[in-house]
Image (spheres, helix red, strand yellow):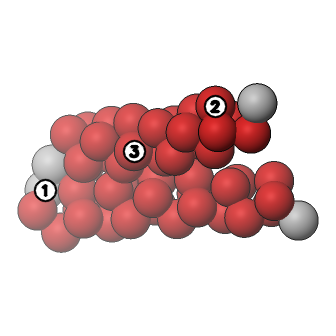
Amino acid sequence: MRYEIIGSLFFILLFLGVFVGIIFNKVELFGFLGLLLGLGVVFLFRKRKK
């Protein structure tokens, strides 16, 4: 159950960054920021688990 929540948070942040990028016409910047935020959430949960 925990991995599904982490994965869904990752994809929500990634798609949110892409959609904000489409709205502001800077898809690369906001998509990259969304990807970094998603990866940060994943690594935060992985580090806390150990």
Q: Which quadrant holds the C terminus?
A: top right
Residue at horizontal 81%, vertical 59%? Answer: 2
As shown in the figure, which amino acid type bears the numbered disc 3? Leu
Residue 8 at x, y = what percent?
Answer: 66, 63
Total number of numbered labels? 3
Q: Which mark, by number, is residue 37?
A: 3
Residue at horizontal 23%, vertical 57%? Answer: 21
Packing grade of label 1 (10 A; few <14, some 14-19, many >=20) is: few
Which residue is more in the foreground, 9 or 2?
A: 2
Between discs 2 and 3, the one toward the N terminus: 3
Between discs 1 and 3, the one toward the N terminus: 1
Q: Which mark, by number, is residue 7?
A: none
Q: Mark 1 or mark 2: which is in front?
A: 2
Residue 47 at x, y = what percent?
Answer: 64, 31
Q: Mark 1 or mark 3: which is in front?
A: 3
Q: Mark 2 or mark 3: which is in front?
A: 2
Callout 2 secondary element: helix
